Amino acid sequence: MSEPTLFDISVRGRHGVSLPALDVPETALPSALLRGDDLNLPEVSELQAVRHFVNLSQLNYAIDKGFYPLGSCTMKYNPKINEDVARLAGFSSLHPLTDELGSQGALAVMYQLQTWLAEISGFSGVSLAPAAGAHGELAGVLMIRAYHLARGETRRTKILIPNSAHGTNPATVTMAGYEVVELPSDSNGDVDLEALRAACDDTVAGMMITLPNTLGLFERRISDVIRAVHACGGLMYMDGANMNALMGIVKPGELGFDVMHYNLHKTFSTPHGGGGPGCGAVGVNDKLKPYLPGPVVQIVEEPNGEEEAPLYGLRMPEKSIGRMKAFHGNFGMHSRAYTYIRMNGGQGIKDISRYAVLNANYIRARLHETYKVPYDRICAHEFVLEGHFEGVDSVHALDISKRLMDYGLHPPTNYFPLIVPEALLIEPTETEDKATLDNFIDVMKKIAEEAHTNPELLTEAPHITPVRRLDEVRAAKQLVLCCQPLPAQASGSRFGED
Ligand SMILES: *Cc1c(COP(=O)(O)O)cnc(C)c1O
């Protein structure tokens, strides 16, 4: 297939902009600064440019178009009021070098958000500095490292990670200079406690655990796990990217975790996908509070009376691991997450988790007779099923995903977690209604039937999308992001089509 590019419809002399009248004195530019050759830009009218980009945007799939059960990613609906708030001129036009007195409104939003996140998770300190979940993980592990080094505990060189952890966890640990010790899961999908106890010694700096784990399961003996690691002097890191199942229900700080990161761009509905700016805020208990990455917002002067606001300031914590990025984190994410929490309120935050868990369990319970569900017990916000059928060797998880696209649905996460063969990780989120879930279930059952009666429908899918089967790696790594004239014979591969 091939959409015409702007170059294809370019007509010499046509334009889509009207420039304002010159309002500065006209002067001749030095000839060295003048352009000698043609810019080679397409020449189109405003309407042609608008239609071109709107048509392109409609080739994409998005949560605003349909159901998006991409496990682990929490593709919930992003309320539009978040966008209105983020675009308020006082926020969006604020220069990051504005002094504290000139940015009290923004600092108040950050302070309140820090406070709410701390309350939701039962921690005593929060920093909004990290720009993504994995960035928050790095901050967390560097804090664990700083804590042990400050106590002279240089023997501690290992971090324990269950094999049901998110892939970023071992990557983070390695980047922070630690050795990864992988722990097996037992047949119920929980951490193998015997293996954990055997691995705990005075060379362990801590344990990093994804909770709920990537199977969508809540670790039932989490208190035993935490006790075992603390007993050998290690600290407990919780990957809290999936707080969507827990917030309002259980506080990781009260369970005994020392540090955790949140993904504001998942749980708290700030937009994500495509690698855009995110926020991987970190929460810590008193032990790690002095090490938080900075700056964090603090009250530097209490209010004089009830009517007055406190004075906020940005401060580096006493033994801070330092800055994670320039300025103060991604403020656009802070103002959106603030709006989201404020719009939902305490009860609303709790309901989000309850409905996210209910929706996942509803789908699991209605699909487990059609598909193999390897850990078939009450799940949290997501669950895994196996995307293949006995006696139909040609059909794999990927084929089911591609066929879903023909029905106008976004596929679930494929081949993750790694410990389940042909894994499809399904996370419906709380923002979908029963009719949407029922439609997804019906389609999944229909696809299972097709796999038996006409497997080519799956193995050759998708049939009706703008592009067919893409090279999974090149489609993401070698994007063609700008409109460019292409030799005629190559135009079919503009989207990395195979
Ligand atoms: C998404 C996710 C991460 C990584 O978050 P990024 O913002 O993509 O870096 C880490 N852990 C878990 C469990 C996740 O779901």
Image: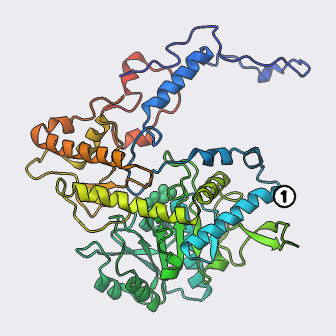
Percent coordinates x, y for residue 22 in the rendering: 85, 18
Percent coordinates x, y for residue 23 in the rendering: 88, 21
| In the image, residue 437 above or below residue 27 | below
Please give left or right for residue 225 compared with residue 20 in the image: left
In-front residue for pair 446/424: 446
Residue at 78 percent across and 57 percent down: it is: 105
In-front residue for pair 373/38: 373
Percent coordinates x, y for residue 152 in the rendering: 58, 89
Residue at 55 percent across and 78 percent down: it is: 144
| In the image, residue 49 above or below residue 106 | above
Q: Is residue 141 in view?
A: no
**Total number of numbered discs in the rendering:** 1
| SS state under label 1 | loop
Of the 4 image quadrants, the one containing the N terminus is top left
| In the image, residue 297 above or below residue 447 | below
Residue linked to disc 1: 99
| In the image, residue 243 above or below residue 90 | below
Question: What residue type is disc 1 on?
Answer: Asp
* Residue at the outermost top position: 12
Q: Ligand 1 closer than 8 Å to the CB at disc 1? A: no
In-front residue for pair 358/139: 358
Percent coordinates x, y for residue 286 in the rendering: 62, 83
Please give left or right for residue 253 compared with residue 365 in the image: right
Please give left or right for residue 397 compared with residue 46 in the image: left
Q: Is residue 360 in view?
A: yes
Of the 4 image quadrants, the one containing the C terminus is top left
